Amino acid sequence: MSVTQSGSATYSGELEGSNAKRGLWSSRLAFILAATGSAVGLGNIWKFPYVTGENGGGAFVLVYLLCIAIVGIPIMMAEVMIGRRGGHSPVNSLRAITQRDGLKPAWKLIGAVGVLAGFLILSFYSVIGGWAISYVGTTASGQLAGQSADAVGAIFSGLLSSPATLLAWHTLFMALVMVVVARGVRAGLERAVSILMPALFVLLLIVVGYAMTTGYFGQAAAFLFQPDFSKLTTSGILVALGHAFFTLSLGMAVMMAYGSYLPKNISIAKTSITVSVIDTGVALLAGLAIFPIVFANGLEPGAGPGLIFQTLPLAFGQMPMGSLFGTLFFVLLIFAAWTSGISLLEPIVEWLEEKKGMNRVVSTLGAGFVCWALGIASILSLNLWADFDPLGFVPMLEGKTIFDLLDFFTANILLPLGGLLVALFAGWVMSRKAMENELALSPAMFNLWFVIVRFVTPVAVAVVFIYNLL
């Protein structure tokens, strides 16, 4: 079932049940798979292991889990609730709610901030997804076998230095995303995640099983789960808080968009908690898959962003059956990036359908093309424009390429800002009765969520926001 256009004339009059006219998830499981597919991405398999390695392991993981509970889950519940309550694209859901409840119309900008963030992220996220596609062939062909660290680094440098190669892989990744989104909710999003997510879990478990044969699985488990608070810094705590926010796809309007397709009889709280638990489990499994391989080869767990595309390929090249399992690992990475890419494109496509009256295919092609074109700037900033410093006159942005600026602007400004605004809207502005009806919690559980989203979450997100800027 494809999503059909919903006229803007119904915003103020048909809030309840408005999403019944549109495509809906067929079941709670479908929503969980889709939302988990959005949350499980490069943040889990690429970023979580290296930020854990950089911040000392177990103590960082413990703080990260606490941040998921006190920041991630409450905001996810709020975003899904807003989406289902409004029953439209993120911008129009906020417009519907503000009109219905007599609130200031400026609050609809929350949706716009999230849609913009997701759109900008996808433009460079697609470039990284292209790297993963490239590495499937590189690993499967045995090019990494027996290579030195310098040789492996040269392979990655060679990839980044070729605009034409990067453009080809970027184009392929965007095409994969657009094909799924163009088919709508059930025929596209739901069908894709029902295949990709189980496959992702199976691949991840296979790589974990392989990691168990290295002889360093116990050391990796201790590194992840035995807290050493002497290694935890204030910076590490704030990184944990920021990553908990990023990894659940919060502040990107994704959960609002997906929530708008959620039937009224499905519990927002249970599904949000389930998605958060699965997403966190995948991140921890990724650590258990990666760190034994890193330790077995005497490599550095805090190798930074190069952990996946330089450190791990070096390890796979030195290990028995490394080509096979390295290939499986990068296929896993593609699946994770693909499901997230789908969710990042969906909010803008949903908005174009409603605002401009475009059908699903045309809106997908239009939004996808603009996003693809913007990605070219990120590609060129890795090679031909590597010395171009567009905002060098700003001290904190000096030396950042276009790729770096997009990453910085979205991760450090738009996402925290969007999450902060969602928390403020749910905690201080939105009708309490409307939220009680949507969440359908017991009075005690609703009060707990309400206190957290009203007082705890905004402070936590504001601290991260200010810290990232300073």
Image: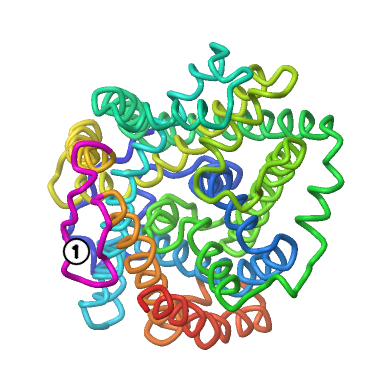
Q: Which residue is mark 1?
A: 392
**Where, by quadrant of the figure, is residue 317 drawn?**
top right
On the rendered structure, is 102 left or right of 416?
left
Main secondary-structure element of the magenta-colored stretch: loop
Seen at 16% across and 52% down, the residue is 355
Camera sees residue 39: yes
> Residue 418 falls in which quadrant of the image?
bottom left
x then y, percent, for residue 388: 17, 50
The kind of residue on which mark 1 rests is Gly
Query: Of residues 244 and 100, which is closer to you in this image?
Result: 244
- Asked if one can make out residue 359 in the rendered structure from this viewpoint, the answer is no
Toward the top, the furthest residue is 141
Relative depth, front residue between 306 and 14: 306
> For this view, does 73 lie left or right of residue 399?
right
x then y, percent, for residue 85 = 40, 65
Please state, as top left, top right, bottom left or bottom right, where the C terminus lies in the image: bottom left
Q: Is residue 304 left or right of residue 370?
A: right
Q: Which residues are magenta?
A: 383-402
Q: SS class of the residue under badge 1? A: loop
**Is 152 on the left or on the right of 361, as rendered?**
right
Q: Is residue 172 above or below residue 243?
A: above
Residue at screen point 39% across, 50% down:
20
Q: Is residue 389 magenta?
A: yes
Q: Residue furthest left?
A: 356
Q: Residues within 10 Å of mark 1 (few under 14, many from 20)?
A: few
Could you say where residue 458 lies in the image, as x and y percent from the top left? Answer: 47, 82
User: In the rendered image, which quarter contains the N terminus?
Assistant: top left
Identify which residue, 281 or 288, lies in the foreground.
Answer: 288
Up-down: is 326 above or below 61? above
